[in-house]
Image (tube, helix red, strand yellow):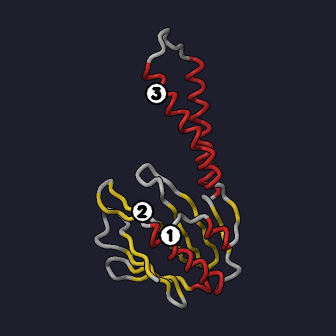
Amino acid sequence: MRYRKRENLFTNGESEYRIDDDALVRRAPDGSEQRIAWRDVKALRVRFFPTMAKPWLHEFRVEAAGATMTIDNGHFAGVADFEDRSASYTPFVRAALARVQAQAPKAQVRIGSRPLAFWATMSFVALAFAMLAAVVIVLPLPAPFPLAAIAKLAVIAYGLYLLPRWVRRNWPRGASFDSAAAELPPA
Protein backbone atom coordinates (compact mmCIF):
# COMPACT_ATOMS: atom_id res chain seq x y z
CA MET A 1 0.00 0.00 0.00
CA ARG A 2 1.26 3.50 -0.86
CA TYR A 3 0.44 7.08 0.07
CA ARG A 4 1.85 10.15 -1.70
CA LYS A 5 1.93 13.84 -0.81
CA ARG A 6 3.97 16.96 -1.38
CA GLU A 7 5.17 18.32 1.94
CA ASN A 8 5.56 22.04 1.22
CA LEU A 9 6.65 24.78 -1.20
CA PHE A 10 10.32 23.90 -0.84
CA THR A 11 10.09 20.26 -1.90
CA ASN A 12 10.21 19.45 -5.59
CA GLY A 13 7.90 16.50 -5.96
CA GLU A 14 5.97 14.20 -3.70
CA SER A 15 7.13 12.01 -0.86
CA GLU A 16 5.96 8.44 -1.12
CA TYR A 17 5.13 6.42 1.96
CA ARG A 18 4.73 2.67 1.61
CA ILE A 19 3.96 -0.29 3.78
CA ASP A 20 6.43 -3.12 3.24
CA ASP A 21 6.15 -6.47 5.00
CA ASP A 22 8.89 -5.52 7.46
CA ALA A 23 8.86 -1.70 7.60
CA LEU A 24 7.23 1.67 7.04
CA VAL A 25 9.19 3.39 4.28
CA ARG A 26 9.35 7.05 3.24
CA ARG A 27 10.90 7.80 -0.12
CA ALA A 28 11.76 11.50 -0.43
CA PRO A 29 11.55 13.35 -3.77
CA ASP A 30 15.36 13.15 -4.06
CA GLY A 31 15.20 9.32 -3.88
CA SER A 32 16.53 8.88 -0.34
CA GLU A 33 14.66 6.46 1.89
CA GLN A 34 13.89 6.27 5.59
CA ARG A 35 12.78 2.93 7.02
CA ILE A 36 11.26 2.11 10.38
CA ALA A 37 10.95 -1.62 11.01
CA TRP A 38 7.53 -2.56 12.39
CA ARG A 39 9.11 -4.64 15.17
CA ASP A 40 11.12 -1.56 16.34
CA VAL A 41 8.10 0.72 16.78
CA LYS A 42 7.89 1.98 20.36
CA ALA A 43 5.02 4.47 20.11
CA LEU A 44 2.32 5.80 17.79
CA ARG A 45 0.34 9.01 17.97
CA VAL A 46 -2.81 9.95 16.05
CA ARG A 47 -4.04 13.50 16.39
CA PHE A 48 -6.36 16.06 14.92
CA PHE A 49 -4.15 19.03 14.04
CA PRO A 50 -6.20 21.73 12.30
CA THR A 51 -4.70 24.96 10.99
CA MET A 52 -6.33 28.01 9.43
CA ALA A 53 -5.48 26.75 5.93
CA LYS A 54 -6.12 23.07 6.71
CA PRO A 55 -9.04 22.70 9.16
CA TRP A 56 -9.29 18.98 8.30
CA LEU A 57 -5.64 18.10 9.05
CA HIS A 58 -4.81 14.86 10.89
CA GLU A 59 -1.36 13.58 11.79
CA PHE A 60 0.09 10.09 12.32
CA ARG A 61 3.44 9.82 14.10
CA VAL A 62 5.53 6.66 14.37
CA GLU A 63 8.40 6.55 16.87
CA ALA A 64 11.16 3.94 17.08
CA ALA A 65 14.56 3.94 18.75
CA GLY A 66 16.42 6.77 17.03
CA ALA A 67 13.83 7.37 14.31
CA THR A 68 10.55 9.21 13.91
CA MET A 69 8.22 9.52 10.94
CA THR A 70 5.26 11.91 10.77
CA ILE A 71 2.61 11.64 8.07
CA ASP A 72 -0.40 13.90 7.59
CA ASN A 73 -3.31 14.07 5.17
CA GLY A 74 -2.45 17.53 3.81
CA HIS A 75 -0.97 17.78 0.31
CA PHE A 76 0.66 21.04 -0.78
CA ALA A 77 -0.81 21.93 -4.18
CA GLY A 78 0.37 25.56 -4.31
CA VAL A 79 0.75 28.69 -2.24
CA ALA A 80 -2.23 28.77 0.15
CA ASP A 81 -3.67 25.79 -1.75
CA PHE A 82 -3.86 22.46 0.07
CA GLU A 83 -5.65 19.22 -0.75
CA ASP A 84 -7.25 16.93 1.79
CA ARG A 85 -5.94 13.47 0.91
CA SER A 86 -7.94 11.62 3.55
CA ALA A 87 -9.31 9.24 0.91
CA SER A 88 -5.88 7.61 0.57
CA TYR A 89 -4.40 8.64 3.96
CA THR A 90 -6.97 6.93 6.19
CA PRO A 91 -6.71 3.43 4.62
CA PHE A 92 -2.91 3.78 4.64
CA VAL A 93 -2.76 4.66 8.34
CA ARG A 94 -5.24 1.90 9.21
CA ALA A 95 -3.00 -0.59 7.41
CA ALA A 96 0.06 0.77 9.26
CA LEU A 97 -1.77 0.46 12.60
CA ALA A 98 -2.60 -3.17 11.77
CA ARG A 99 1.06 -3.92 10.95
CA VAL A 100 2.29 -2.40 14.20
CA GLN A 101 -0.39 -4.23 16.17
CA ALA A 102 0.72 -7.52 14.59
CA GLN A 103 4.50 -7.02 14.80
CA ALA A 104 4.94 -4.69 17.82
CA PRO A 105 1.84 -5.24 19.97
CA LYS A 106 3.47 -3.62 23.03
CA ALA A 107 3.91 -0.27 21.24
CA GLN A 108 2.31 2.62 23.09
CA VAL A 109 -0.65 4.11 21.26
CA ARG A 110 -1.56 7.70 22.00
CA ILE A 111 -4.28 10.04 20.81
CA GLY A 112 -4.16 13.82 20.88
CA SER A 113 -1.39 16.35 21.22
CA ARG A 114 1.78 15.89 23.20
CA PRO A 115 1.19 16.90 26.82
CA LEU A 116 3.62 19.84 26.82
CA ALA A 117 2.20 21.28 23.60
CA PHE A 118 -1.37 20.78 24.81
CA TRP A 119 -0.84 22.52 28.13
CA ALA A 120 1.18 25.33 26.54
CA THR A 121 -1.69 25.94 24.12
CA MET A 122 -4.27 25.81 26.89
CA SER A 123 -2.22 28.27 28.97
CA PHE A 124 -2.05 30.66 26.02
CA VAL A 125 -5.81 30.37 25.43
CA ALA A 126 -6.56 30.97 29.13
CA LEU A 127 -4.29 34.01 29.15
CA ALA A 128 -5.89 35.36 25.98
CA PHE A 129 -9.41 34.97 27.41
CA ALA A 130 -8.33 36.57 30.70
CA MET A 131 -6.94 39.58 28.83
CA LEU A 132 -10.09 39.74 26.73
CA ALA A 133 -12.26 39.68 29.84
CA ALA A 134 -10.16 42.44 31.38
CA VAL A 135 -10.57 44.60 28.27
CA VAL A 136 -14.30 44.01 28.14
CA ILE A 137 -14.70 44.87 31.84
CA VAL A 138 -12.35 47.88 31.94
CA LEU A 139 -13.11 49.64 28.66
CA PRO A 140 -16.42 51.50 28.53
CA LEU A 141 -18.67 50.73 25.61
CA PRO A 142 -20.10 53.60 23.58
CA ALA A 143 -23.75 54.42 24.15
CA PRO A 144 -24.97 53.34 20.70
CA PHE A 145 -23.57 49.80 20.54
CA PRO A 146 -21.68 49.72 17.17
CA LEU A 147 -21.96 46.92 14.64
CA ALA A 148 -18.19 46.31 14.85
CA ALA A 149 -18.52 45.41 18.54
CA ILE A 150 -21.28 42.93 17.72
CA ALA A 151 -19.11 41.34 15.02
CA LYS A 152 -16.17 41.03 17.44
CA LEU A 153 -18.39 39.43 20.07
CA ALA A 154 -19.67 36.98 17.45
CA VAL A 155 -16.10 35.95 16.59
CA ILE A 156 -15.32 35.46 20.28
CA ALA A 157 -18.49 33.41 20.75
CA TYR A 158 -17.55 31.21 17.77
CA GLY A 159 -14.09 30.66 19.26
CA LEU A 160 -15.66 29.66 22.57
CA TYR A 161 -17.99 27.30 20.69
CA LEU A 162 -15.03 25.56 18.95
CA LEU A 163 -12.76 25.37 22.00
CA PRO A 164 -14.41 22.34 23.72
CA ARG A 165 -14.28 20.37 20.45
CA TRP A 166 -10.59 21.13 20.04
CA VAL A 167 -9.87 20.22 23.68
CA ARG A 168 -11.80 16.93 23.40
CA ARG A 169 -9.98 15.88 20.23
CA ASN A 170 -6.48 16.95 21.36
CA TRP A 171 -6.54 15.87 25.01
CA PRO A 172 -3.36 13.74 25.43
CA ARG A 173 -4.31 10.18 26.33
CA GLY A 174 -3.34 6.56 25.89
CA ALA A 175 -5.43 4.42 23.59
CA SER A 176 -5.85 1.06 21.92
CA PHE A 177 -5.12 0.38 18.27
CA ASP A 178 -8.85 0.28 17.54
CA SER A 179 -9.59 3.61 19.22
CA ALA A 180 -6.67 5.21 17.34
CA ALA A 181 -8.16 4.00 14.05
CA ALA A 182 -11.51 5.49 15.08
CA GLU A 183 -9.86 8.94 15.41
CA LEU A 184 -8.89 9.01 11.73
CA PRO A 185 -10.82 11.16 9.26
CA PRO A 186 -13.40 9.47 7.01
CA ALA A 187 -11.84 7.97 3.90
- Residue 151 got which mark? 3
| Quarter occupied by residue 32 | bottom left
Mark 1 burial class by Cα count in 10 Å: few <14, some 14-19, many 20+ = few
Residue 59 position in % (x across, y down): 52, 64
Mark 2 burial class by Cα count in 10 Å: few <14, some 14-19, many 20+ = some
* Disc 3 to disc 1: CB gap under 8 Å: no
Residue 153 position in % (x across, y down): 52, 27
Q: Residue furthest bottom?
A: 21
Sequence-wise, the earlier of marks 3 and 1 is 1
Q: Residue sitting at 48 percent across and 28 percent down?
A: 152
Mark 3 burial class by Cα count in 10 Å: few <14, some 14-19, many 20+ = few
Q: For marks 3 and 2, give the CA distance.
A: 30 Å
Q: Relative to 182, is 94 above or below?
A: below
Residue 128 position in % (x across, y down): 56, 35
The amino acid type of the residue labelled 3 equals Ala
Q: In the rendered image, which residue does mark 2 sit on? A: 84
| Quarter occupied by residue 42 | bottom right
- Give left or right: position of 88 versus 77: right
- Give left or right: position of 50 versus 171: left
Which marked residue is nearer to the observer: mark 2 or mark 1? 2
The residue closer to the viewer here, 145 or 135, is 145
- Residue 70 got which mark? 1
Q: Residue sitting at 59 percent across and 43 percent down?
A: 163
Sequence-wise, the earlier of marks 3 and 2 is 2
Figure disc tally: 3
The amino acid type of the residue labelled 2 equals Asp
